[in-house]
Image: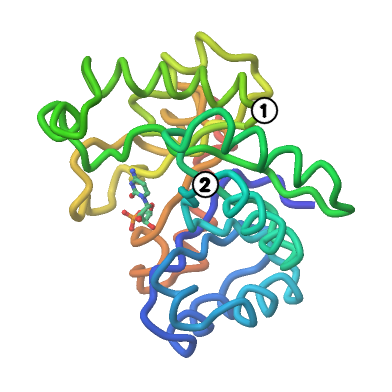
Amino acid sequence: MNASPVIVALDFPDQESAMALVNRLHPSLCRLKVGKELFTRLGPAFVEKLVTAGYDVFLDLKFHDIPNTVAAACDAAADLGVWMMNLHASGGRKMMETARARLAGKAHQPKLIAVTILTSLGEEDILEIGFHGTPAENVLRLAALAKSSGMDGVVCSPLEAAAIRAQADSDFLLVTPGVRPVAAAVDDQKRVMTPSDAIQAGSSYLVIGRPVTAASDPLQALKDINASLQAPAS
Ligand code: C5P
């Protein structure tokens, strides 16, 4: 049983460097996220290898296509034994509901999470795409759409977590990247929160990459983050 909310982002270019990190961690201390780079290089066999090693795997492929195609991709991902997968809420209700219905028939049911507005997009970017309002307004609207379309939760910035949590039940999952332990470098993340602040803001799971993957002692860095979440709030 894994009590940690930490999902370590396996942002590596090849299997050797990814497994060098994985072999230093343990499935009882974290979950793992496999994204587009690693999946495109290494394919389903790598995901199955992590699942076989006992890890809960978040397959971060952000599906966005016609409903039938996304549902079929979700079905295939479920067959890999992943614990969580995601799609774009902007694919629409029909796409999300079709994916949900397809997974409902599976023996193994991964959590299905929606991306609202990519945090790389600013107000001008989303206006140019044709979305009106601020990114924050669009995030809340798409989070509500994701919930009413049967999604288990959304990926969001920890800075958006409290507002989404205020409009959703406690069982609606908020998966937040942009998390940095106090002492860690911010890297290219602009808006960050500490792990304990993110949990207090309503995050269910924390996606953390470089503070663990680039640490001189990744296991200790992970244990320190987990310990910071056990400490009573100040
Ligand atoms: O190294 P770092 O902790 O910044 O890694 C964060 C992970 O979360 C990366 O895999 C990144 O692609 C992902 N992510 C993010 N911000 C988003 C969505 C995903 O940092 N808005």
Mark 2 is surrounded, within 10 Å at the Cα level, by few (under 14), some (14 to 19) or many (20 or more) other residues, namely: some
Q: Amino acid at mark 2?
A: Ile
SS class of the residue under badge 2?
loop
2 vs 1, front mark: 2
Question: At x 33% / y 26%, what residue is drawn?
Answer: 159
SS class of the residue under badge 1?
loop
Q: Quickly name the residue at label 2.
A: 66
Using the rendered view, name the quadrant where residue 116 is placed.
Answer: top left
Q: Amino acid at mark 1?
A: Gly
Left or right of 17 on screen, residue 2: right
Q: Quickly name the residue at label 1.
A: 150
103 to 10, vertically: above or below: above
Which of 142/136 is in front?
A: 142
Mark 1 is surrounded, within 10 Å at the Cα level, by few (under 14), some (14 to 19) or many (20 or more) other residues, namely: some
Left or right of 81 on screen, residue 144: left
Question: At x 22% / y 43%, what residue is drawn?
Answer: 120
Question: At x 18% / y 41%, what residue is drawn?
Answer: 190
